[in-house]
Structure formats: structure tokens, C-alpha cells
Amino acid sequence: MKKLSKSIVENYEKHPEKVLQFGEGNFLRAFVDWQIEVMNKTADFNGSIVVVQPRGSKKIEKLNEQNGLYTLYLQGMKEGKAVKEHMLIHSISRGINLFTQYEEFEQLAHNDELRFIFSNTTEAGIAYDETDRLDDRPQKSFPGKLTAFLYYRYKAFNGNKDKGFIIIPCELIDRSGEKLKEIILQYASLWNLGEGFIRWVHDANTFCSSLVDRIVPGYPRDTIEEITNELGYQDDMVVVGEQFHLWVIEGPQWIREEFPAHISGLNTLFVDDLTPYRTRKVRILNGTHTAMTPVAYLYGLNTVAEAVKHPVMGRYIKEMIFEEIIPTLDLPADELTNFANAVLERFGNPFIKHLLLSISLNSFSKYKTRDLPSLLAYFNLKKELPRKLVFSLAALICFYKGKRGAEEIKIEDNREIIELLSRHWRAFDGTVESAREIVTAVLGYERIWEIDLNSVPGLTDKVTMYLYEIETKGMTEALETVLQVKAKNQGGE
């Protein structure tokens, strides 16, 4: 069977390179790159994307082998009906491997038509690394790479303020655009790039914070043979996403004229303040994803849909959302309830096999961003700890032991976090005291949390108790104990 490339595609389109994208992963290709494809077809956006990888990856090579082409399957509820459809995406022009093609990356800064920069490097990606240098090829951090690129642009056009960018990071951190700009200015100072460059960063570039929402399970490993037969060609970059999508961008309204998503009927909004949208989505959808993953996986489940539909795990998820997360949100109750019910329906999408392991990347930074605010807000509001969110934290620590029974779990996270957990788990001797040592070390690791969580009254004790129960009784019994607490209390015990 032929492999996907432009040689087998009728009416292969080539558009000017208007977008630089940091990230070649499933989400951006099923969300941003799809939107640009739609705008090219329906709103005359007339632009293509140059993709670079924020970390080492072979996906760049695979994309280039397929001339940037890939197939996107959208599956789920659409206008009240279950719909499964697919389309060929042409919007990526090429990928640049920063480790072998850095000169091409530098030369891209001279492209007069380049206008937008998008990124999705996970919550851990927008971070300052003081060891980065301008003459590195490439820099280690994503903001370091971007700062270097902006400096190349500044020099290529002699500081022309008309040659700046609209920069829209898609990472799920609060004030992502502001945070990214702040780090870029740190590098500008560290690298002595000059006051002229700093003024150009301020005056020529528009940094927008944004909120993204689409569940993207990624590559359909279990059904790829069936998909290949349906397509009639081999596509190593197939990606699956749900039908639902929402992109909220906090920025000036004039950007709509350059990024005409509204003309294409896309659910992309330009707003003055995305805070209410972000809080609702990050706490309920992303927070639930992150909190349920270690619990459900150690329970023996493998996908989001299995977890939501499971009688015990499903109850845990629903009670966590409606009893512990929603009460902390300062939004209308009906709006929150409707959003939560829609999220649960999306989690149970019959078309999508969303692997829990695919959600587990950088889980600690995700928990800090998505779940810790709910945990602390609940404690401040109720003067007690939210049992299910705390249980999730204990399960996360267990998950990083790297074992599900005899099965190895491949942990993907910051090296320091992995080493911290590995070191303490190797010293674990099966006692409560040893469990407390692990918990105390993790909760006190301020490079993750930015505070010492051992200072939260009762948290160390509660996480230790849950961790010990999971280790000694197993996840099934430990979870059922947590869920029975409410029933016992209501019974007067």
C-alpha cells in the first residue's frame, strides 16, 4: 500500500508560510493546524505552518516524509448526533529538526510573510533555564528557542516594528502569554541583547494568553489497520480527536481580521478576559483528567471512557467533580453543572479510546496547575480536606513508583521529579513511617508546588494514610474505602 505523500494527493495545495509552531504533537495537529486548514478552505487565510520540536522527537522526520500531510479523524457528538468523519490536513508545509537543521530555523526569521507563533509544550514547557545561551544550537528551553528566534527576526529586519508576531501559546498555565513574554525578557537581559531588542519585543509583538479545549487521544494504535484499509494509504501520523472544540484567545479584536476563524464558523473567541473560561475548563475538565488518571490506571483501567463508565471509578469521578471541584468555583451553579455534565458526556465518547497513560505526561506540574487550586480552595472554604482530590495526590505518588502489579509504567516527567520519587521509593520498607517520608519529601518539594504543602493542616497525614492504604490493600479496596466514608458519615457513624 502506498504511503501518504503529496505524490498521491490530488490538488495538493501549497500556501505561504505564515505560522511558526513549537510542537508537532497530536493536540496541535488536531486543533490549531486543523483550524488553519479550515480557514484556508473557507476564509482565504492562505497560510501554512512550519513546525519545530520543543524536545527531541522523530515526528518531525515522519512529517517531512509525508510532506506535512496527515489524516485527522473527528469522532463524537455533532449537532446532537454521533458523527465519525475524517479529513486530510495540508496546512503543515514542513518540519525543521532543530538538532540537525538549526540554520533553517534561523533563516526562517527572514521570511517576510511569517506572522503567527503558536506553541504547546505542556505546562512544564514555559520555564526559564538560566543555563540556556544564545549561541546554543538549539537552546534547551522553549522560551530560550523563541527568544533566539525573535532576536534573529529583529536583526533580519533591522528592528522594523511591522515585522513582529502575534504569539499565542496554548499551554494550560494561567496568563500564558504574559508568562512567556516575561521569560523572553529575562533571556534578553541574560544574553545582553540590548534595549533596542527589548523595545521591539514590547512594541512589535502581541502576546496573547489562550485557552484550548478539545480531547485528543492521538494515534489510534488499536484501529490503525482498519483505518489504513479505509483510507487506502499508509499514514504514520493519523490523529484522532473529538468533534467538540473551543479556543478562547485574550487579545485585541483586530487579530480576528488576520486570523478569521469567525468567518469559518470555528468556535474560536477573542475576548478581553479569558479568566472565567479558563477556570471552569482547567478545574473541571483538565483537573478531572489529571486527578482520575493515576487512580483509574492503578485500579486496572486503561482509558478515560472505561473509567467514567465503571460503577466504582465513575462514582469517584462524579463525586470529585460535583462535591469537591464545583463548590470552589465562583460561577453560576447552573452553568457549572451543565458544563460538568457535558464534560462527562465527552469523556464517555464511544468513538474515542483516550489512553490514561497519554494523559500522564508531566503529571506533577499538571496537578499543581489543574488540581491543587481546587484542593486549597476547598480547604479554605470548608475547613477540611477534599478526600477525593487528596486521594488522587496519593495515587499520583504511587503511580510514580512505576509499577502496576508486575507491569512497568513508563514515567515521563522532569528528570529531577522522577529521580526524587525513584530515590524515595527505593528506600520504602512497607511501613507507615516510610510512607510518610515519601509524602513529606514530595509535598515539600517546592520546585514543583512553589510552596511547602506540608504546611497545609492535615494534608501530610491524609496523603500518608491514603498512600499506605493503596500500597498495603491495593487500589480497589483503598478506593472503595474512600467512597464509603460519605455513606458512613450519613449513617451517623
Image: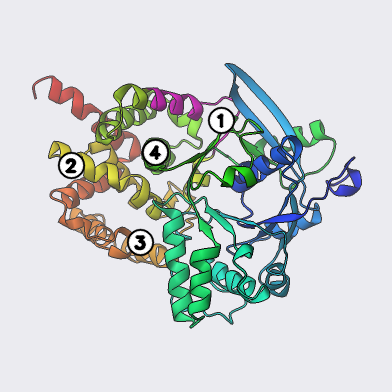
> In the rendered view, would you say 99 is above or below 61?
below
Measure the alpha-carbon separation of dots 3 and 4.
20 Å
Question: In the rendered view of the protein, which quadrant contains the N terminus?
Answer: top right
Inspect the magenta stretch and tell me whether residue 343 lies in it.
Answer: yes
Q: Which mark is residue 96?
A: none
The amino acid type found where label 1 is placed reads: Phe
The x, y position of residue 107, in whole percent, is 72, 72
Q: Is mark 1 on a helix, strand or loop?
A: loop
| Residue nearest the observer in this picture, 109 or 49 | 109
Q: Give the alpha-carbon distance from disc 3 to disc 1, as whole Å.
A: 37 Å
Instruction: Point out the tag, 3 or 1, that comes first from the N-terminus.
Output: 1
**Residue nearer the viewer, 294 or 456:** 456
Q: Which amino acid does label 4 sit on?
A: Met
Q: Which of marks 3 and 4 is in front?
A: 4
Residue under label 4: 292
Which residue bears the numbered disc 1? 244
Per the image, label 3 sits on a secondary structure element best described as: helix
Q: Where is residue 252 in the image (x, y as percent from the top left)?
A: 50, 47
The local secondary structure at tag 2 comes to: helix
Q: Residue at x 14, y 39 (%)?
A: 384
Using the numbered discs, state the Cα–Cα distance from disc 2 to disc 1 in whole angstroms: 33 Å
Residue underneath mark 2: 379
Which colour style is shown?
rainbow
**Which is nearer the N-term, disc 1 or disc 4?**
1
> Who is closer to the viewer here, 378 or 393?
378
Q: How far apart are marks 1 and 4 (CA)?
A: 21 Å
The residue at the point 16 percent across, 38 percent down is: 381
Q: What stretch is highlighted in magenta?
A: 338-354
Depth check, mark 3 against mark 1: the one in front is 1
Tell me the distance, in whole angstroms, between the alpha carbons under discs 2 and 3: 26 Å
Q: Which of marks 4 and 2 is nearer the N terminus?
A: 4
